[in-house]
Amino acid sequence: MNEALPGRLEHVHLIAIAGTGMGALAGLLHARGLRVTGSDRALYPPMSEMLARWGIPVAIGFEPGHLEPRPDLVVIGNAVRADNPEARAAIEAGLPIRSFPDALYQFAIADRHSVVVAGTHGKTTTASLLGAVLTGAGLDPSVLVGGVALDFDGPFRDGAGPHFVVEGDEYDTAFFDKTPKFLHYHPRTLLLTSVEFDHADIYRDLDHVKQAFRMLIHSLPAEGAIIAALDDEHVRDVIGGARCPVIGYGVDAGERGFRALDLSAGPDGTTFRVLRDERELGGATVPLYGRHNVANALGALATALTLGAPFAAAAAALARFRGVRRRQEVRGHARGVTVLDDFAHHPTAVRETVAAMHARFPGRRLVAVLEPRSNTSRRALFQQDFVTALAGAERAIIAVVPPEPLYSNTGAVSEYLDAKRLAADLQSRGVEAEAIDGVDAIVTRLAATCREGDVILVMSNGDFGGLWGKLLERLGGG
């Protein structure tokens, strides 16, 4: 669906505009002077706030009438199914159609040096880190991420420099294109953070995931570069056969590539030493916590230096990083309790986030509250992995998610995560744990049982019914 566009593009309509990537593209096109409209099933923060701030009108629901007046281009998000009435009407009317990644590449990346940040974990944070470091080093990049980067006051930055930094997802592109999204960005530089099994509705198993990443690796030109997290065994596996140079990075171990040593958590974040091929480059500080975030920061530094940034300027910019909304974000304090909001939903991300919060708040009781909401986390695939992931918390509450029908590439799903069994397994490990049905019930339970000094870590890849806000209001700090 690559129909020719009119000679002058003035009006772009996005179906499923409220997704993080689609909303960011809408904002970028709006900032470039185009008329942008969109539709979606519902709107949620933070993208609802961003779209409202930009003045982009959004129709709720999917109807053929939303295509009037006739747009010059329709961008269809990957959340849209083949039977979507608005998408079908656009196709039947012969309107020019693009998928999100194809539109982004055609209108923003094609004439730039494409820098793709890919991996199962850490993409949004690492791409935001890289964008902030390149900006601070004076390279004036363009950036687009799947979240609200506080350094850019939004999900994108439209710079004048030669580089375009984009978060590259392995999820499929659209109902009419089942190839991974990251292939459509045609990277010259690739930062690869991790490879694990995820997106069980798309991928059969880890080997299937690796096939997608191998396609990405093999797509890079010989004059390109891959900056790879070599601490990850699956990353080491997929980079074999790369046609371009591979530059490794990691924490502590190894001798070649970029290494972070002597990690130390303090009030300003985590400090560490940076080496390249056993040569000391200097010290660095990232205003984040946890070994995984140091690895993300190191990957961003390694990529920025590969692209020509001086170390001193890059390290100084790293220390000024302001973060990303919903990534270990402190939402408020009340009655001596600190409430945080985080996007973690995969067991590895949950485990690392729990460890990071212990480093950030030493000596305080950590209460982990998890909503297993994604298509993968709702299944029984990670039943035991979530036990390990949450075992680092002193207390855990798991939301009981209704077993609404799920489908994968092999058909209907029959096995679902058992929240009550997860809580029981955690109790057997000495963790105070319970499974609770309903956001209001969780808020009531937390408000009745939390103690002064508690750190409440709320984790979900959705809005979790506004749980953190309701809790702060109940505690008197909202």
Image (cartoon, rainbow, N blue to C red):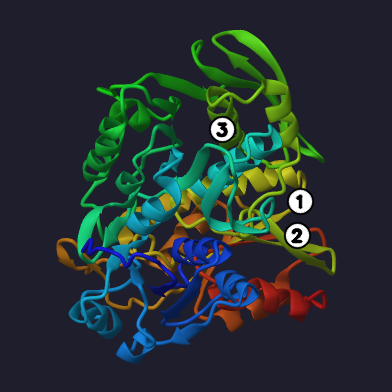
Query: Disc 1 designates what residue?
Result: 364
Q: Amino acid at mark 2?
A: Asp
Relative to 129, say whether 402 is above or below. below
Q: Amino acid at mark 1?
A: Arg
Query: What residue lies at 36% left-to-right and 58% top-to-bottom?
Result: 103
Disc sitting over residue 417 in the figure:
none
Badge 1: how crowded within 10 Å, few (<14), some, or many (20+)? some
Q: State the residue position of label 2.
A: 454
Mark 3 — residue?
295
Secondary structure type for disc 1: loop
Query: Mark 1 and mark 2 in contact (Cβ < 8 Å)?
Result: yes
The image shows residue 444 at horizontal and vertical percentages of 66, 80
Q: Where is the N terminus found, in terms of image quarters?
A: bottom left
Q: If you read the primary sequence from the N terminus, does the residue marked by circle 2 or circle 3 appear first?
A: 3
Drawn side of residue 408 relative to residue 107, left or right: left
Q: Earlier in the sequence, mark 2 or mark 1?
A: 1
Q: Position of residue 243 (x, y in %)?
A: 28, 22
**The quadrant where residue 187 appears:** top left
Relative side of 462 to 176, left or right: right
Question: Which quadrant of the figure contains the C terminus?
Answer: bottom right
Q: Answer whether labels 2 and 3 touch (C-beta < 8 Å).
A: no
The residue at 59%/82% (across/down) is 441
**Residue closer to the observer: 302 or 267:** 302
Occupied quadrant, residue 211: top left
Mark closer to the observer (2, 3): 3
